[in-house]
Amino acid sequence: MIEAKNLTKRYGPRIAVDDLSFTVASGRITGFLGPNGAGKSTTMRLLLGLDRPDGGTATIAGRRYRDLRQPLRVAGALLDAKAVHSGRSVHNHLLALAHTQGIAATRIAEVLDLVGLRDVARTRAGNLSLGMGQRLGIAAALLGDPQVLILDEPLNGLDPEGIVWVRTLLQQLAAEGRTVLLSSHLMNEMAVTAEHLVIIGRGRLIADCSVTEFVERH
Ligand code: ADP
Ligand code: ADP
C-alpha cells in the first residue's frame, strides 16, 4: 500500500534518508522505529510528497502522493501535533479543516467520538493538554476517512488512558483494512501497538519484520 524504493534525501552534506526501501501492507499497524534523528520524519514527509527525494520513489497505492487528486481522502497524516496553537474551539478548528478539504461538517462529531474528545468540543484547541492535543491531531487526520494513516509519534505526550484509547482506535482502523504507519523511538510502545516493524538507523534500513520475529531474535 505504501512503498519506499531506494529513497534518498540529503540536507547539505548530511544524508537524512539513505537508499531506504520498504513496503507497508494494509490491514495492520506498521511501527516505524528508530532513535531520534534516524530519518523517520523525513521519510514520512517524502511519502506524503511534502518534500522531494534526491533519489528513489515514494508511492501510496501505487502513485506518487502528489498525483492523487483527493490526497486527504487517501492519506491522513499527523506530523506535528504541537502545531495546534489555535485560539478556535476544538470543534471550530476541525470545522475549518473540514471546510478546506470539502468534508461535510457532520463528520466532526464522528471523529470527536472516535478519539474521545466530544466532551471538550467547546474548549479552545490551544488550551488542551499535550495528550488531548495529540488526539485532536489524530482526529484531524481521520477527517477524510482515509485508507492510509501516516502518524509521526502519535503516542508522544499521551497519558496512560490516552495511549490505550489511541492504540485501541488504531488497531480498530487497521482491522477494518486500513493501512497504518506510525513512528516511534520507543521499542516497548511499538511491541504492544504494531504487528509489523520497519526499523531504521542513520537513514538506513536495519530490520523489516513482524514484531513476533523481532522479539524471538532479541
Ligand atoms: P527522526 O524523525 O527519526 O527523529 P528526522 O527525519 O527528523 O529524524 O531527521 C533525520 C536527520 O536529518 C537528522 O540528522 C536531522 O537533523 C536532519 N534534518 C531533518 N530535517 C532537516 C532540515 N529541514 N534541514 C536540515 N537537516 C534536517
Ligand atoms: P514541481 O515542483 O515542478 O511540481 P515536483 O516536486 O512534483 O515538481 O517533482 C519534481 C521531480 O521530483 C519529479 O520529476 C520527480 O522525479 C521528483 N519527485 C517528486 N516527488 C517524488 C516522489 N514522491 N517520488 C519520487 N520522485 C519524486
Image (cartoon, rainbow, N blue to C red):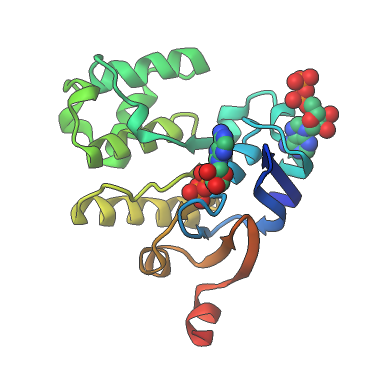
Residue occupying the point 20% across, 51% down: 159
The image position of residue 19, as x and y in percent, is: 75, 54
Q: Choose top left, top right, bottom left or bottom right for residue 204.
A: bottom right
Residue occupying the point 47% across, 81% down: 215
Side of 7 relative to 29 (left or right): right
Q: Choose top left, top right, bottom left or bottom right for residue 27.
A: bottom right
147 lies above or below 155: above
From where the camera sits, is residue 125 visible? yes
The image position of residue 9, as x and y in percent, is: 69, 42
Residue occupying the point 56% across, 28% down: 72
From where the camera sits, is residue 41 visible? no
The image position of residue 113, as x and y in percent, is: 28, 37
Side of 36 relative to 179 (left or right): left
Split into quadrants, the picture shows ligand 1 in the one at top right
Q: Residue furthest front?
A: 13
210 lies above or below 30: below
Q: Nearer the viewer, residue 64 or 218?
A: 218
Q: Nearer the viewer, residue 217 or 166?
A: 217
Q: Nearer the viewer, residue 47 or 68?
A: 47
How many numbered marks appear? 0
177 lies above or below 75: below
198 lies above or below 87: below
The image position of residue 200, as x and y in percent, is: 58, 61
Q: Choose top left, top right, bottom left or bottom right for residue 106.
A: top left
Residue occupying the point 57% across, 61% down: 201
